[in-house]
Structure formats: C-alpha cells, structure tokens
Image (tube, rainbow, N blue to C red):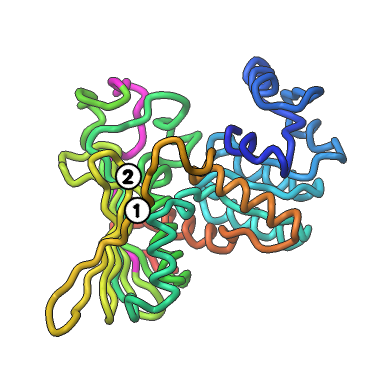
Amino acid sequence: MPSLANNAELAEMVAFCDIVPEKAAKAAQEFGSENAAVYTDYRELLKEESIDVVHVLTPNLQHSFITVDALEAGKHVMCEKPMAINSAEARNMLDAAKRTGKKLTIGYQNRFNDDSQTMFRACREGALGEVYMAKAHAVRRRAVPTWGVFADKEQQGGGCLIDIGTHALDLALWFMDNYKPVSVSGSVYYKLKDKPEGNMFGPWDPETFNVEDSAFGLIKMENGATIFLESAWALNTTDVKEAKASLYGTAGGAEMKQTADYKGEVVFNSVQFGKLAEMKPMAGPGIAYFGPKGDDPGTREAKQWLECIIHDTDPLVLPEQAYAVTQILEAIYQSAETGKEIYL
C-alpha cells in the first residue's frame, strides 16, 4: 500500500477488504481515496464495476480462489508470492487469466533490486556465457517471523521454503531464463522449532510452530542445467544471504553478496589477460539530500505493474514463470516426504 501511494499519479486505492473490519478501515483511512469503501466480503467488493485492479494480500491458502474470482469478475490481479500453496491451485489461476484475458502477476519484488537488475542485464547480454549451474540463497541465521500466520502450515502451506525460498528460486530461474524443470530432490528439516532463543523477532511459540525451519532442493532442468536451492529461517550459520543467487557460466560467474548493512552487491569473476579477475560494479554515489523519493523495489514494482495495465503490456513477472516456481517448491516438499526424486 505504501508503494501504491508512491504512484498516486497512476492509480488510487478506492476499496479495502478484510475479514477483520478494523484492519480494512484503518487501511482505508491511511491509504484510501476520499470516499474509499470498506468491505468484509471480497465477493461484494468484486461487484463494484469501477474497480480495475485487485491486489490479493492474504495468507497463501486464500491466494488461488480470490484471484480466480477477481479475474472472472473482470479485474486485473496482482497476487502476493507465492502464487499458491500447490501447483494445482496455481494452474487454476493461470487458466483463469488466459480464459478472461486479464493480466495476472505475482509479487516477486526482489527482481526490482539494483543487484538483481545488474545480474539480469549481465545474463541477457551474454556476459556469463551458458549458465549451467546456479545456487539460490535464502538463508537466515535466526529470523523466524513471529507475527501473522507464518508458522501455520495450514494457512501458508509451509515455512521458510514457501516464504523466502520462493524469492531466491524466482531470481535464479529469471536470470537463467530457464523454466523447464525435469526432476527435483529435496530435504526439509524441523530441527530447531524448540530452540527459539536469539531470534531477531523475539522468541516464537514452539507449540504453534508447525512448519519447517530449513529446506534444500536440487533441481535439474531440461537443458542439463542444475540449480541448488537453500532456504532457512533458522540455521546455525554465519553465511546469511536472502533473495540472492550465484551463477556459474562458461564465460564467467557472478555472485550476489549481502553487505554488513544488508545492501546487495554483485561480484563478477572471469579470466582476463590470462589472469583470474574479479569485477564489482560501483553503486550510485549516494549524495545526501539528492535522489528520487520512493525509489525502492516495492515502488518500482507497483509503477511497472500499473503502467503495464495502462499501456497494455506484459508485467515483468509473468504468471507462467511464477507457476514454474510453485511446481518446484511443491516437488521439494513431496521429495522430502517420500524420500524419492520427483519427476515433473
């Protein structure tokens, strides 16, 4: 909502819905137009013909059916990540978008980070050659979210993998422009649920924590490329990085790093003049009191999404891409549960 407010020249927020009416009213007062409407039933909101776009910002369990209903009601939809709790529900969303001709995108805002944009451009310009191996990183040492329903498996479909692992996997696939997985092997762990000490967001309740604290996957693609995905809310490591990827190509490699102040940077490696070489692109100058306001990834995401509706172009995050992410995440969970490699 703050990101949409930063793009007030492109759209206004005219209706808000939540099953808790106080939440919807508070949002309407803070972000809404002068006569913004408040609903507790999203189906009533969808009857309002003047609404062009709906943003679905619920727990994961509700993503699919609200999105499908909104598309069927003639609305364009941005749905928060992940697309859905499983690939069948994600397929329903994809089919509804195709059937109605309305635009659908998923909230993978990390594509709009500066370091992500740098990696994407390097890949598209062929700087790394053929990228045949990648690592997708979403690792926290102790940063389990203790608000909302993040630790509720029924509402979310899982823990760290479906919450932050989804961002890292989306980036790796996007950089590689590779959306054809053929097999997945996964391991999912519930090892630290009873050890809430030292958590960045305060201790969680082990009695209600029923999702994984770490998960790992090995994905093999149709063209022979391999992706290793690591995700954790809680892991005994000092090598933390989130929404990052490392790429290994025939002409060079690239690694997204997380600096001490949690900013991102990219380090490219190659061979130049017969010697191993590394190159780190410089960030902007950061001059005090200068620079655009609201130039954060969320605001960029909202601007791009609204402009693609106004100008009838494709959004940066295509639903087909998000569907592939959901397929792989589901396969990691299935592989961990069955102890077998899952073939897609």
Q: Is residue 177 above or below residue 284?
A: below
Residue 275 in the image: state x and y as whole percent: 12, 79
Q: Is residue 197 left or right of residue 3?
A: left
Residue 139 in the image: state x and y as whole percent: 27, 45
Residue 182 visible in the current orientation: no
In terms of secondary structure, where does tag 2 sit? loop
In the image, which is nearer the foreground, mark 2 or mark 1?
Answer: 1
Q: Quadrant of the C terminus?
A: bottom left
Q: Which mark is residue 283?
A: 1
Q: Quadrant of the N terminus?
A: top right
Residue 255 in the image: state x and y as whole percent: 27, 61
Q: Which region is colored magenta? A: 202-219
In the image, what residue type sits under mark 1?
Ala
The reply to whether discs 2 and 1 touch (Cβ–Cβ < 8 Å) is yes
Inter-mark Cα distance, 2 to 1: 10 Å
Q: Which residue is mark 2?
A: 263
Outermost residue toward the bottom in this view: 274
Q: Residue at x 52, y 43 (%)?
A: 292
In terms of secondary structure, where does tag 1 sit? loop
Q: Residue at x 85, y 36 (%)?
A: 48
Q: Is residue 28 above or below residue 291?
A: above
Q: Earlier in the sequence, mark 2 or mark 1?
A: 2
